[in-house]
Image (cartoon, rainbow, N blue to C red):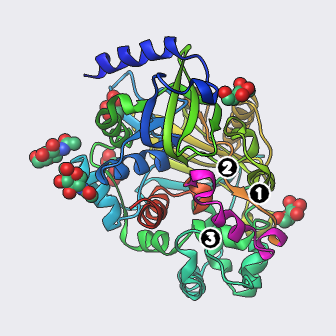
């Protein structure tokens, strides 16, 4: 089935090289769908599967050769085992269970802590760092009480006017104001990839470490029993078949005022196809540079241009001499809450097959070589902590940049998110990436459920 369709599509791609002018639209061959979805990560894949259940035809346009976005799974050639080093776990919500259930993928409960020995070290020097200040549980309770004051934070950015000033404080000030100091260490372990967490605007941190995550800390998360997070996306690829255009990118868009269609020129592995869709879902970060091919209008561009982003990198390495079953948390002795200055490693975590996952964050973009070089230098400081390590041998690398998209507190105060929400449906385009909610698959899916119910039923 799949190969025949692929052949047909290949034939079409030869026939049509670019979006035809309006007069030539008749007698052209298009991939005609109810919905074209740009991006096959967590958001785009979920939207595609749910829309199919709602009897709408879809096509997913994904630039990589597989669906899954920030889900990174390495196959260890030594053992054949799957090793996840990107997205790891999901909150245990009915929606998560029902999505995995659709593909008959069994979930197992996982505790967060695991059983690895935790070492806290300053990876600038290899000096050991003491335990975090106590009082975590009480601080988490106070934190939860804060979250429950703002139930509308749970899904999307439907903010009241005025936006509570507390939510616009730098997170460090919010912490001091509400005596949440004891919770900083655990929140910083979760809220990775956000730049300087103490200077990050509070609203983004509360959305990232939300009620479902607090609940997960207490009662556990879920993951596929196979310990292969790509299993979900493999199953989605099989279901979508030729409706998943992999290695594909939109290169131009057009629409003609009196027609219900958006035409997308899609470059796929050397060929070009024209997708004609009634609606378009943008499931990639809405930054102007990434959306050039969608020809953003004035109003869209003005909003997208305001986004700043942080940078986040996931790597997997063999570190000779690294002690087994050990987790290294990067901390510092002389900084507030012992948090390491950026750019920095977050964690070194043990993985099956003597592999170590190394997560790394930066406020400004870095090249792969720079990330690996800095990681190497910092890992080698562990020799001063008594670990006889050799330089890491990287086996996998994944760039999750642009990661967190934020706008300034002033912009939020002045109604940025109302304007962004008003874009939903503008020019028959809908925005459903993590940016519209938070960087957490279960929360992204929850947001999309709301969007599909509101706009696509
Ligand atoms: C995009 O398509 C339109 C309509 O066919 C065309 O006029 C325009 O030149 C194209 N732009 C690019 C950059 O190819
Ligand atoms: C989708 O179509 C099938 C077959 O026509 C039908 O049984 C089902 O009820 C429809 N589902 C929805 C959500 O419309
Ligand atoms: C993990 O799942 C993906 C998608 O089904 C599959 O392609 C891959 O081979 C699996 N990896 C392992 C090691 O089983
Ligand atoms: C899941 O299992 C049900 C019942 O055995 C079956 O009908 C369905 O086709 C399966 N779905 C997938 C995606 O394997
Ligand atoms: C720690 O957990 C891993 C997998 O979760 C298991 O294989 C290992 O035996 C455990 N080690 C100890 C010391 O309990
Ligand atoms: C802290 O955040 C504010 C607002 O987001 C930003 O303008 C400022 O440059 C940041 N300061 C530092 C030191 O990163």
The quadrant of the picture showing ligand 4 is: top left
Prevailing SS of the magenta stretch: helix
Q: Where in the figure is residue 152, as x and y percent of width and height?
A: 56, 79
The mark found on residue 290 in the picture is none
Image quadrant where one finds the C terminus: bottom left
- CB within 8 Å, label 2 to label 1: yes
Foreground of the two, 35 or 363? 35
> Is 248 drawn above or below residue 209 in the view shown?
above
> Dot 1: what SS?
helix
From the Cβ of disc 3, is ligand 6 less than 8 Å away?
Answer: no
Q: Residues within 10 Å of mark 1 (few under 14, many from 20)?
A: some
For label 1, the residue is: 303
For label 2, the residue is: 286
Q: In this rendering, does residue 85 appear at all?
A: no
Asked where in the image residue 149 lies, by quadrant, the reply is bottom right
Q: CA distance from mark 2 to mark 3?
A: 15 Å
The magenta stretch is 410-431
Residue that appears at 40% across and 41% down? 58
Q: Is residue 200 magenta?
A: no
For label 3, the residue is: 157
Image quadrant where one finds the N terminus: top left
Q: Earlier in the sequence, mark 2 or mark 3?
A: 3
Q: Earlier in the sequence, mark 1 or mark 3?
A: 3
Q: Where in the figure is residue 40, as x and y percent of width and height?
A: 48, 40
Q: In this rendering, does residue 8 appear at all?
A: yes
Q: Is residue 143 left or right of residue 245?
A: right
> Dot 2: what SS?
loop
> Is 183 drawn above or below residue 50 in the view shown?
below
């Amino acid at each position: 089935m799949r190969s025949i369709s692929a052949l047909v599509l290949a034939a079409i791609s030869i026939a049509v090289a670019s979006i035809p002018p309006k007069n030539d639209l008749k007698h052209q061959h298009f991939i005609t769908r109810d919905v074209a979805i740009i991006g096959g990560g967590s958001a785009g894949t979920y939207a595609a599967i749910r829309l199919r259940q709602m009897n709408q035809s879809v096509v997913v346009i994904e630039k990589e050769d597989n669906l899954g976005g920030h889900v990174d799974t390495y196959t260890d050639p030594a053992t054949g085992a799957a090793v996840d080093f990107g997205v790891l776990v999901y909150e245990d919500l009915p929606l998560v269970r029902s999505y995995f259930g659709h593909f008959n993928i069994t979930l197992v409960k996982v505790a967060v802590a695991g059983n690895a020995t935790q070492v806290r070290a300053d990876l600038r020097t290899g000096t050991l760092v003491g335990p975090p200040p106590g009082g975590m549980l009480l601080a988490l309770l106070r934190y939860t009480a804060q979250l429950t004051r703002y139930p509308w934070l749970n899904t999307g950015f439907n903010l009241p006017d005025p936006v509570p000033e507390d939510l616009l404080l730098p997170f460090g000030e919010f912490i001091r104001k509400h005596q949440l100091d004891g919770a900083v260490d655990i929140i910083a372990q979760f809220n990775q990839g956000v730049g300087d967490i103490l200077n990050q605007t509070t609203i983004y941190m509360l959305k990232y470490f939300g009620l479902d995550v607090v609940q997960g800390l207490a009662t556990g998360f879920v993951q596929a029993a196979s310990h292969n997070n790509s299993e979900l996306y493999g199953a989605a690829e099989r279901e979508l078949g030729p409706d998943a255009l992999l290695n594909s990118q939109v290169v131009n868009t057009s629409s003609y005022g009196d027609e219900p269609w958006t035409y997308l020129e899609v470059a796929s592995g050397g060929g070009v196809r024209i997708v004609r869709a009634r609606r378009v879902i943008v499931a990639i970060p809405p930054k102007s540079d990434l959306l050039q091919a969608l020809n953003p209008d004035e109003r869209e561009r003005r909003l997208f241009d305001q986004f700043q982003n942080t940078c986040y990198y996931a790597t997997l390495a063999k570190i000779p001499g690294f002690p087994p079953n050990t987790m290294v948390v990067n901390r510092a002795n002389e900084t507030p809450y012992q948090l390491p200055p950026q750019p920095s490693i977050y964690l070194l975590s043990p993985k099956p097959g003597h592999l170590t996952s190394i997560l790394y964050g930066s406020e400004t973009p870095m090249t792969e070589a720079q990330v690996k070089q800095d990681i190497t230098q910092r890992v080698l400081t562990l020799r001063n902590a008594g670990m006889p390590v050799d330089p890491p041998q990287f086996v996998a690398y994944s760039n999750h940049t642009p990661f967190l998209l934020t706008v300034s507190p002033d912009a939020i105060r002045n109604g940025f998110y109302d304007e962004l929400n008003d874009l939903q449906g503008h020019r028959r385009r809908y925005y459903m990436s993590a940016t519209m909610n938070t960087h957490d698959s279960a929360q992204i899916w929850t947001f999309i459920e709301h969007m599909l119910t509101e706009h696509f039923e």
